[in-house]
Image (cartoon, coloured by chain):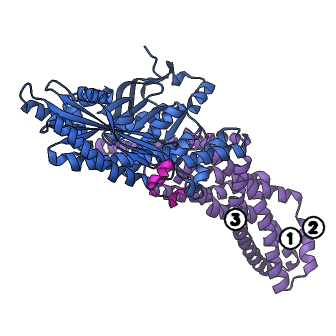
Chain colours: A blue, B purple
Amino acid sequence: METPLIEFKGITKRFSGKTVLDRIDLSIYENQITTIIGKSGSGKSVLIKHIIGLLSPDEGSILFRGKPVDKMKKKEWEEYRSRISYMFQNNALFDSMTVFENIALPLKQTTNLKKKEIEKKVMSRIEQMELLDAANKYPAELSGGMQKRVAMARALVTDPAIVLFDEPTTSQDPIRRNIILSMIAHYRKKFGFTAILISHDIPDVFFISDRILLLWDGKIAFNGSYEEFYRLKHPMIDEFLLSIEGLKDELTGLLSKRMFRSRYDILTDQRNIGNIITAVLFSIEFKMPDEINGSLISTEILKALGEYVNTYFGPLGGFSARHSSRKILTVLPYLKPEEVEKSVHDFALELQQKTLTGSAADVRECFEIEVTAGITEAGPSDDIENIIEKAEKNKKIIALYKCGKEDS
Amino acid sequence: MDNSLARNSNLLLYFFNSLGKKIIKIINELGAIVIFFILAFLKIFRRKQIHEIIQQIYYIGAKSANIVMLVGLFTGMVLGLQLYYTLTKVGSSGFLGSVVALTLIRELGPVLTAIMITARAGSAMTAEIGNLRISEQIDALYTMRIDPQRYLVSPCIAASIISFPLLTALFDLIGILGGYITGVVLLGVDKGAYFYRIQAHVDIIDIRGGFIKSIVFALLVSTICCYNGYFTHLRTDSYGARSVSLSTTSAVVLSCVTILISDYVVTSFLM
């Protein structure tokens, strides 16, 4: 069995007699994105502050690759800390320093890099985070969203092995939120770090997470994958999702995954055995050299696709939800398979003309977008994951945008 | 009778209990300040400190020079005025130069300079460090493996040790000129006698004493001000911006009181 990168063993933390963390046991694995969710004030930030040593547990121990951190020698402890970076909930930027100086600070103070090397590294991060115009501004002159990106650039500038993100997407609009999360996922792949995220942005954060931890009443109430989280029927998870997740997906305007599942369950209950329904899985494949612009365009196209799916298939009795960062599943209970084929064909023509060409008009770089649709039939025994799997096998390109050439 | 005895002994117990607690708290606090100072002082000599120290010398020293000169000038002028009338009464107005210079160099120069720097730069140190503390910027430094004490406190202490004696010298010089303006220019004391008496009566021991005082004040003021800002989040009487403002007030008051008390102690040792 894989040794966890970081392990909590019986961690308890109390503040003024109030127990915030109550004998917590958890494991964080290397190169994964672990998301910690929980109600406000449930101790999520307290939990991750223990990892970097900002707080010490009252009881229990934290292990790094099996070694207790409280028993590490000074050199080992410093080495352990040098691998970790922390992005604060309120950004914690130095308001008397410019954006450039803020990002350069850890390099200036903790490395022996030359001035030019530091400048090059900082400027590359500034460019990646779309902060070129803000490089010489002070944090107070920036919007909340830009400040978040500065904090993220500062957290990543030292190329850490573990990055702790404390609510990286708060105060962001749905598009920017998805871009930040895509960036975290992208950089995780590119630089190979382990990410530990605290977020309330459901479902967006689930799409990039390998593991979900639900902190409830000071204990880890759930530890597993995102699919397991939605499949698990538990009053506590229902209560949590009800308090966090709305009825609709904020980015696309489609149903939330929970609502989608409820409607699908009702439909399954109402159906006679032998009745077949049709479902379509829309996916977006995107190729662009620049990841930041790529995330922006693909998020905008996903948003447009969601809105368009809703407008087109809603009146036909269909209901849809986003099932991963670039996939939308639509269930059409009242149409026959051949009618669905025709509808998807008509939909593809309009999508090509209106959405893809329109969204691509402002982008100067050469890029490719493929929208695929997989049509499948589902029986009463099929669950949503089965339907997605079957539809995935039937997918065909329905719309294409390639460096100014459209096709369908 | 028994009841009143019991009540009195309870009151006495309560009195000593609370007094003891307060004394223990003060001793703990003093111990914490001493440890804080020792750690910060030792970190002055770490690498990558020069730039931060120069920056602090600019804030604490260079930027305080104008106010120190202004106060020095008027202190010297008032001294010239008052001492001229006092010395005239005993027929010794010719000693004006030496009395003004000795008063400034031995006593008023170090004390008033320290108080002026406390008001100008000491309060700024507390407010700035306190602000960094409540906005989690000190925690951010820690997460970036930058020792907050080394980065924020040590440069202030080093810059104070350098700036206080220099500003004291500036204060003394301008004060002597102030005394010259009132004594010689306005009241007609002989110019040659004014400077001759200074040369004749001011010894290197007087100057050294003044500088020792200014270094002691530098250590006290910078430590008290940085300590109050650094631990502003531990205040139990207030939170957030209010705690920063209260810490700043406490730092300034405590620094001024400590300057005067330590002035007496150092003077008695130097005599």
Quarter in which the C terminus of chain B is drawn: bottom right
Q: Which residues are magenta?
A: A138-149
- The chain under label 1 reads B
- Estimate the x, y position of residue A82 in percent, counting from the top left: 59, 32
Kind of element beneath mark 2: helix
Q: Are marks 2 and 1 in contact (CB under 8 Å)?
A: yes
Q: Earlier in the sequence, mark 2 or mark 3?
A: 3
Q: Magenta includes A144? A: yes
Instruction: State the residue position of label 3.
Output: B64
Mark drawn on residue B98: 1
- Looking at the image, how many numbered discs can be counted on the residues? 3
- Estimate the x, y position of residue A396 in percent, counting from the top left: 32, 34
Nearer to us of marks 2 and 3 is: 3
Q: Is residue B126 above or below residue A30?
A: below
Kind of element beneath mark 1: helix
Question: Callout 1, which amino acid?
Answer: Ser
Out of A234 and B216, give the one closest to the viewer.
Answer: A234
| Residue that protrudes farthest toward the top in the picture | A1
Out of A348 and B226, give the one closest to the viewer.
Answer: A348
Q: CA distance from mark 1 to mark 3?
A: 27 Å
Is circle 2 on the same chain as circle 3?
A: yes
Kind of element beneath mark 3: helix
- Estimate the x, y position of residue A261 in percent, counting from the top left: 19, 35
Nearer to us of marks 1 and 3 is: 3
Quarter in which the N terminus of chain B is drawn: top left
Q: Magenta includes B65? A: no
- Estimate the x, y position of residue A136 in percent, counting from the top left: 60, 58
Instruction: State the residue position of label 2.
Output: B200
Name the residue located 34 percent from the left edge and 30 percent from the top edge: A213
